[in-house]
Image (spheres, rainbow, N blue to C red):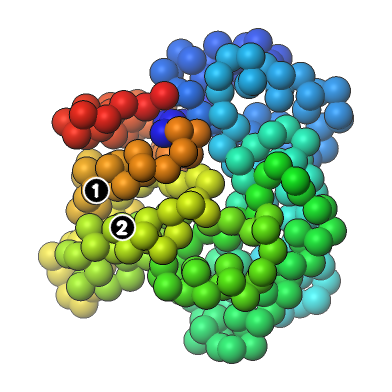
Amino acid sequence: MRLGAHLYKPFESPDEWVQVVRSYGYSAAYCPVGPEADDATVAAYARAAAQNDIVIAEVGAWSNPIDNDPAVAKAAIDKCKAALDLAERIGARCCVNIAGSKDKQWDGPSAANFSDECFDQIVQTTREIIDAVKPTHSFYTLETMPWIFPESPESYLRLVQAIDRPACAVHLDPVNMINGVKVYFNNAELLRESFRLLGPRIRSCHAKDIALERKLTLHLNECRPGLGGLDYGVYLRELSKLDRDVCLMIEHLPNEEEYVAAAQHIRQVAADNSLAFG
């Protein structure tokens, strides 16, 4: 397994990018270029990654392919196609987006998000994206979310089976599936069930944490790894059973110091469990 995060040091070339990734002790990285990058630039970063044993974990395609506005939805689907094409060209393990939302906010909660019609629309948009690019090395994945499919390991498996495309894989963010008190306190079982049902399909994972506040009615807040209740021992033990290049990517922290502290915590938990990152 490999650890990576967002980078705070600038780089202007593949060689400088490698130096920055290694300066943090990471062996995985978010994609260093966007879909607008020309083929020569993409190929240069792909070579630098391969030659220096760095895995490009994921290309983000953050958008709303199921937006209620057809024009917005089309633009999002086109963005996803371009991002998946970049993932294929640069050798990333996956392209990742959320399924979208029927809310006015692109990633917001809506009762319509859990309708059969929404499920079917996610299936069709995902098929369209994959079928347009036809990747043979990378995969298209949907990040788990608390209020849209896939919101649980069971619904993720059902969704992947319905999409029925070899290039559809899994992006695991367990914190995003903790949407209640019981699952918060039983998140070790959530993790085990996620890996039991989805393990071979998992291409990349996000690393963050979640804290339950002691005030009514219910407040669950995302936080830095180590400051919440996610069972990182179980998370890392399960992750270590997958292929050696599966990536754990730290995200959503405000500054470099927080990322360094998060990485230190995750590495310490790994060491406490006799595990190590590649």
Residue appearing at x 81%, y 32% in the figure: 37
| Residue 270 in view here | yes
Left or right of 84: which side holds 173?
A: left
Q: Is residue 182 above or below residue 21?
A: below
Of 25 and 76, which appears nearest the observer? 25
- Tell me the quarter of the image containing the N terminus: top left
- What secondary structure is found at the residue carrying circle 2? helix
- Tell me the quarter of the image containing the C terminus: top left
Where is residue 81? Give x, y as percent: 79, 54
- What secondary structure is found at the residue carrying circle 1? helix
Q: Is residue 189 above or below residue 173?
A: below
Q: Residues within 10 Å of mark 1 (few under 14, many from 20)?
A: some
Where is residue 249? Give x, y as percent: 45, 39
Left or right of 67: which side holds 170?
A: left
Residue appearing at x 21%, y 72% in the figure: 181
Provide the residue designation for mark 1: 234
Provide the residue designation for mark 2: 191
Of 66 and 49, which appears nearest the observer? 49
| Residue 224 in view here | no
Residue appearing at x 56%, y 88% in the figure: 115
Where is residue 196? Give x, y as percent: 36, 60
